[in-house]
Image (spheres, rainbow, N blue to C red):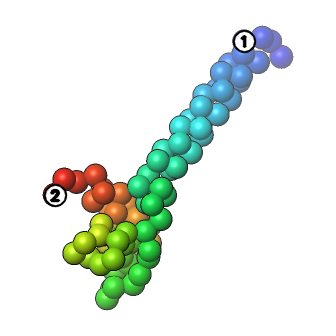
Amino acid sequence: MNNFNDEGSGIIYMNEIRQHAADEHFEKMRPSTRYSPKLYIDGDKWCALYGEDLQNGVSGFGNSPEFALRDFDEKWKKKI
């Protein structure tokens, strides 16, 4: 192999490592990861709740636990 291909492959590999590290950091910093809200089924939706109840806590709803946690992350950032 020539050096160009080796160097090009190395650059691609390093970019993939950087992207993976950035993705991991993003996941660790999500409010749903940091605060671990409880997951419940509420009617036909999943609820992710941090706090005692819906009035005094932060909640997110969705058709799956993943969507409830994504909604929770968005609600966490909103001002009252």
Q: Is residue 20 visible?
A: yes
Counting the numbered discs, the total is 2
Q: Which mark is residue 4?
A: 1
Q: Callout 1, which amino acid?
A: Phe
Please tell me the numbered disc located at residue 80. 2
Q: CA distance from mark 1 to mark 2?
A: 55 Å
Counting other residues with Cα less than 10 Å from the Cα at mark 2, is it few (<14), some (14-19), or many (20 or more)? few
Query: Is 64 on the left-hand or right-hand side of 57?
Result: right
Which image quadrant: the N terminus?
top right
Point out the residue furthest to the left here: 80
Give the x, y percent position of residue 29. 47, 47
Asked if 18 appears above or below 39 in the picture, the reply is above
Compared across the picture, whether 61 is left or right of 25 comes to: left
Q: Secondary structure at mark 1?
A: helix
**Residue drawn 50% across and 50% down?**
27
- Across and down, in percent, residue 5 comes to 73, 17
Question: x, y (%) of residue 45?
Answer: 34, 80
User: Does residue 15 appear to the left or right of 77 in the view shown?
Assistant: right
Helix, strand or loop at mark 2: loop
Which mark, residue 23? Answer: none
Q: Quadrant of the C terminus?
A: bottom left
